[in-house]
Amino acid sequence: MSIKPGIRYGIISFGILFYLSILGLPLPRTLGGFGTLALGLFWAVLVLISLVTMRETDQRRYTTIEAVTGGLLISAIAGFGMALVVGLFGRLIADGVQVNTVFAQVLPEWVGTFTGQTKQEVQAGVSATTALLRFALLMTSAGFLGAIVSRGLTHSSRERWHDWINSPFMYWLVIAMPFVFYVWYFALARGILGATNTSISGLVLACLFVTAVLVALRRVRDKRRRLVFGIAFVVMLILLPQIGDQFQNTVLNKIAIFSVVGIGLNIVLGYAGMLHLGYIAFFAVGAYAYGLLASPDSYFVINFMGGDGITFWQGLLVAAIVGALMGIIFGVPILRTRGDYLAIVTLGFGQITFLLLLNLREFTGGPGGVLDIPPPTLFGVDLGSAESILYLAMIMLAVVAFMTLRLNDSRIGRSWRAMKEDEDVAATMGINLSTTKLVAFAIGAAFAAVAGVLYATRQVNIFPDNFALKQSIDILSLVIIGGLGSIEGVVLGAVAFAGLPEILREAENYRIVAFGALLVAMMILRPQGLLPPLEHEEDIDVSDRRQDAWLQIFDAEEDDQDSAETGATGTD
Amino acid sequence: MTTIEKRATSDYRPKMRPSQIALYGFGILILVLLGWRIYNVVSVEQYPIQFWAIQSINGLVLGSVYALIALGYTLVYGILFMINFAHGEVVMLGGFAGYFALQLCIRWGWVAADAPFFQSWLAVLFPIAVGMIASLLVAMALERIAYRPLRGAQRLIPLISAIGASFFLQYSALLIFGVTPHNYQKPAVLTGAVSLGDSGVFISKTGLFIILASIVLMLILYILVQKTKIGRAMRAVAEDQEMASLMGVDVNRIIVFTFVIGGLLAGAGGVMLGYQNTVMRFNTGFIPGLKAFTAAVLGGIGNVPGAMIGAIILGELEALGPSLLGLPNEYKDVIAFSVLIFVLIFRPTGILGERLSRERA
Amino acid sequence: MPLFECIELSKAFGGLQAVDNLTFHVDQHEIVSIIGPNGAGKTTVFNLISGFYRPDYGQITLDGDDITGLPSHLITQKGIARTFQNVRLFFNMSIMENVLVGQHSRTKGGVFSVILRTPGYKREQEKARATALKQLSFFGTRLAGYRQNQPANVLSYANRRRLEIARAMATEPKLLLLDEPAAGMNPKETLEMADNIRRLRDERGFTILAIEHDMKVVGGISDRVIAMDYGKKIAEGSYKEVTDDPKVIEAYLGTQGGSFTSK
């Protein structure tokens, strides 16, 4: 029967809606002036919940009537519950109770979004029973819809869905998407579509284009086609900075820079399997190394270098060397620590670096940061524009990705991955764990440091706050959400973590809440990330895997070749 | 056979590896340098003895709060082998719940300077109780939603989930409760200070209360873990989950129970942080959580006495370290983390830890 | 002089003396089996030899070199490779890669030669690949061929054990430690494994020290058998001598209800 799950999920749904609402979603200012959008969102959430909970699974099967009952129960409990809460809050506000000393976002406007009243009406305590009833019924309709739609989601429809995803139509659609977004972006930027303020929407298209390229490259398996489309995409990427305006290029170069950092962390974490929570320190070291040796105001430049800082290109070299050295110096003490201990010690290193940057005022400028970091120049040409930095960042990304791919498919990469899977066994394969770890640290750190140089020149002024623990967690999350061990994944993660904040500027705090929830959900539903390395996704022969699962259950070890010859023979 | 017999008379005790000798040499060098520096600073600065006494009492207060929080980390680690990265947020939410309870007390007139003695104490204890309950609920929800589905997964996965939960809770609190700091108002019995004889050493009443309350709470925990049936079951699960479940221990229930205890202590710690700092913000729990975790690692994570010792050491280091080394106070965190790293180099499993070393092979 | 020697090896965990004053040797081209009831300390001996634990006392020598207490990777480089009782492959790496990892200490390519793909590195990799293929083909078509680029976790249990042995062979050891190579195999596979172990010695020239529970295998392959109980050596000699030894019979009867066969 569906009564019990209906009530249970109804209460859960009510909890979710209540939580979302006290986060402040219904406030008009949150969603760009459209408080009612939040109601639409609530409605959609209810449709989704009733759809998922009432659908057919291996364990349970509801009749249509049961499903509708369940769906209605879910949404009615949530809807009427919310109406009750809103009514209560409205009454409290009308009585002059400062509800917002507890729930900061529950303001008269908040109630107004649900009841359709103005701020003054809410404060005056005008009754809104009909409006709330209407709201509750609207919410209840969501459950009905969800339950009805769930009838269509049977096992066979899931298979059909799978077939459809794998159909040639979808194949070509996926390949076509980058071109569509690209042309759209171009048209928008050139004003062909007539819109005036296109900065944000253009950026969205550019991000979608990058994402679509990553997805398309993954879908194309045929070598020759890969080459053809690969070249096409590369040409498009080369021309990309020419299309965008300065804002878009600034965000895109941030994405590229963070991709480089992510690839570095990916070596340490994705390949070598060491959870480094202070990785941002290497990024900071690169940025500060260049900043302190190049900025005309820096202590070092003034006192030791006669006012002449180093150039960007020298900075790259210095940062790579200093970064690698830092990786080794930070690495040596933690060679003997494993797992969680490694995580906390590296977190400590990250914090120490941050605190030193903050407190060694004389050398690093303290909270005031390093200012006026010079732009790169080449033969006297200033390369400080967003566009040129984007080019530099793309070149850097390409070089770093190339190096990483080569390292991964080599004895060094194999030793990393072996160590990640089983340190003890890796050691019995003759792998020197200490050097293997240090090489991973050094390379990962050098990548981050080099990216730091570019970041410093992009920012012009850098501050310790650019390199706080939060950024470290951001980079960690981008690598994990993208897919550990996969370069496409890292770039996708960078789009999400460096691009989205710029798009959703107003809603930065909501973004962090959403990403926190996303991290949890990803770990539960798809721990390998959005774009995991290919061999984990599809190359595995499913039948072999099934056979293996069967073997593990029965512990009756039968090689498939043997069973073909002799038929099944049981053991013991 | 003769060769073997002949050799059998020689000594086969293991020798130190050169790398170990170098490591210990390095450690001794650092200790000597530190000692030298401390000797110089102390002989030059000539702080009065009262200064050191007051500072170490401050360290003790700080250490007590860390200990309450660290126990939550260490209990969960002992059983699930995972870092409950969101524990600092459990602390913070407990602190917020305590804040709202305190507001109620203010409304009831319990906090005012002229409130009767009994009610004034109620105003101290009621927020702590509310904070404990709130933290308990958050910790249980956390376990149910973010950790239970991941049981048995690779160790990295629950940790990342915990990091996600931490940011989710932290920024939720920012949005729900707003950015403005919430000011804790101390009830009458916690204002002022107590003088220890006529030595010139003072301890704030809040500090004294925090130390005593922490000791009481930890004693209760000790009795719970050591003497009760559920405590025995807890230790059994920590020792060997599979075996314990074969013996009829409901492992799920024990894990929830562990989170409950961790949550209760965290709630108390959160409210005490509020009394101590007199202010509550969305990120109040994060850094103390980090420190408490550091303390747990320092003592040997998974080890209950270790967490307490580690917390006290860390608190003292933060209070005394900067003055001893002649550094500005901002360096207290640098000192704390450096000591953590230093300890882990020489004892990778912490001061009292041993379990990890046996996990090999 | 024997190829491999353990002298007065001892290791205690807390109060438990896991290995107690154990002395034995393995000669060149010999197959020696260690038998004993569960918990007799057999696997601990392997862990001591391969450097997972440091012995409390005693000496281990290979070819006259003292290797006591060396880190695992150096022991492997000196020429000892092992397999594990509970098959520990790199399951997310391909079959080929598993064996290539075994070649790690026999190759030298550094970071720069890897990134630049220098001719020297290419040559070395060609060679490593050829060696890996040779080791895989030791088991006929079971591991080689179309499978070699699939991840190791697609393999069946018996093939996992085979791959583990191939991986150990790839480190080019002088002494091969096999920890229960036939555990969990069906009778047909067990026979084949016994045959394989003999071939390892006869065709590839390895010296082998094996822990085995299955007495048919032990009897079939061993030149010499060492019986252990409570960390001590209780008997040594040919298969017949050891299985007839009253102390051995008592050790098994006392703990396993008189059954000589595995499980």
Image (cartoon, rainbow, N blue to C red):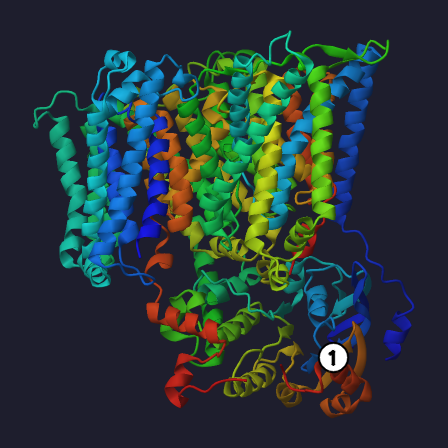
* Residue A328 seen in the figure: no
Instruction: Check the residue under mark 1 and report the chain it is in.
Output: C
Q: Amino acid at mark 1?
A: Thr
* Residue B285 seen in the figure: yes
**Residue A162 or C130: which is nearer the viewer?**
A162
Q: Residue at x 67, y 11 (%)?
A: B191
Q: Residue at x 37, y 32 (%)?
A: A19
**Residue B13 or B107: which is nearer the viewer?**
B107
Image coordinates of residue B153 in percent, x first then y, are 49, 54
Image coordinates of residue B346 in percent, x first then y, are 73, 41
Left or right: C225, with B142 as reference point: right
Image coordinates of residue B300 in percent, x first then y, are 69, 42
Q: How many marks?
A: 1
Tell me the quarter of the picture where residue B323 sits.
top right
Compared with A6, C191 (above or below) is: below
Tell me the quarter of the picture where residue A262 sits.
top left
Residue that label 1 marks: C255
Q: Residue furthest top?
A: B114
Give the position of the C terminus of chain A as an image quadrant. bottom right
Which element type, helix, strand or loop, lies under badge 1?
helix
Image coordinates of residue C77 in percent, x first then y, are 63, 63
Compared with A133, C229 (above or below) is: below
